[in-house]
Amino acid sequence: MKLINQLSKETGIPIGTIRFYEKSGLISGQTKKEVTTNNYVYYNEETIEKLRFIQMAKAVGFTLAEIKEVVDAWYKKQLSKTAKINVLNKKLLQIEEKMKELKAIKKQIAICKSQIENEID
């Protein structure tokens, strides 16, 4: 069991971000029932795994809403291997669509730039 500052150091995630994830329901910690003199929250190894999963998912373009949708099921082993692959395939398709949109925008900007360059002053 680790305190939030230890969790932050181990994962490289700022304390404020960890607290935000906790408020968002992505992770949770526990207080020790026998300790009543403080409100320290302790986190287990699964929390570290979840935080690393969240970092990886954010890095490849998942939104926090999307991450929240799958993180608990993913870690409670409620998602089969096929379901996990389907989640990732869905994200790959979204990325492909975004790339097509960006290419179309890039083409329009290039056309606009070319027209401006060819204007007579």
Image (cartoon, rainbow, N blue to C red):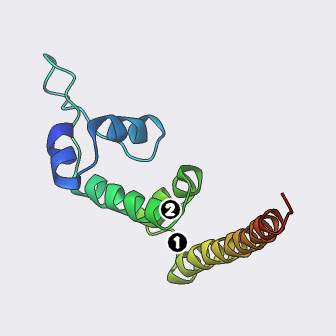
Where is 98 relative to 1, above or below?
A: below
Which residue is painted at 44% across and 63% down in the image? Answer: 59
Q: Position of residue 51 (x, y in %)?
A: 33, 55
Asked whether residue 110 is in view, the answer is yes
> Residue 69's image quarter?
bottom right
Apparent side of residue 66 relative to residue 112 in the rendered image (left or right): left
Of the residues shown, which amino acid type is indicated by label 1? Leu
Distance of label 2 from label 1 (alpha carbons): 6 Å
Label 2, secondary structure: give it. Answer: helix
Label 1, secondary structure: give it. Answer: loop
- Residue, far front: 121
Q: Where is residue 30 in the image (x, y as percent from the top left)?
A: 27, 37
Which residue is painted at 86% across and 62% down in the image? Answer: 120
Asked if the residue under mark 1 is in contact with the one under mark 2, i.e. CB atoms within 8 Å, the reply is yes
Q: Earlier in the sequence, mark 2 or mark 1?
A: 2
Of the residues shown, which amino acid type is indicated by label 2? Ala
Which residue is painted at 72% across and 70% down in the image? Answer: 106
Query: Which quarter of the image is occupied by the C terminus?
Result: bottom right
Q: Position of residue 104 (x, y in %)?
A: 78, 72
Apparent side of residue 94 relative to residue 33 in the rendered image (left or right): right
Q: Which of 110 and 104 is in front in this view?
A: 110
Apparent side of residue 89 relative to residue 71 in the rendered image (left or right): right
Apparent side of residue 21 relative to residue 64 in the rendered image (left or right): left
Label drawn at residue 107: none
Where is 6 relative to 110, above or below?
A: above
**Residue bearing the label numbered 2:** 73
Q: Which of 57 and 113 is in front in this view?
A: 113
Q: Where is residue 108 in the image (x, y as percent from the top left)?
A: 80, 68
Which residue is painted at 23% across and 54% down in the image? Answer: 11
**Residue bearing the label numbered 1:** 79
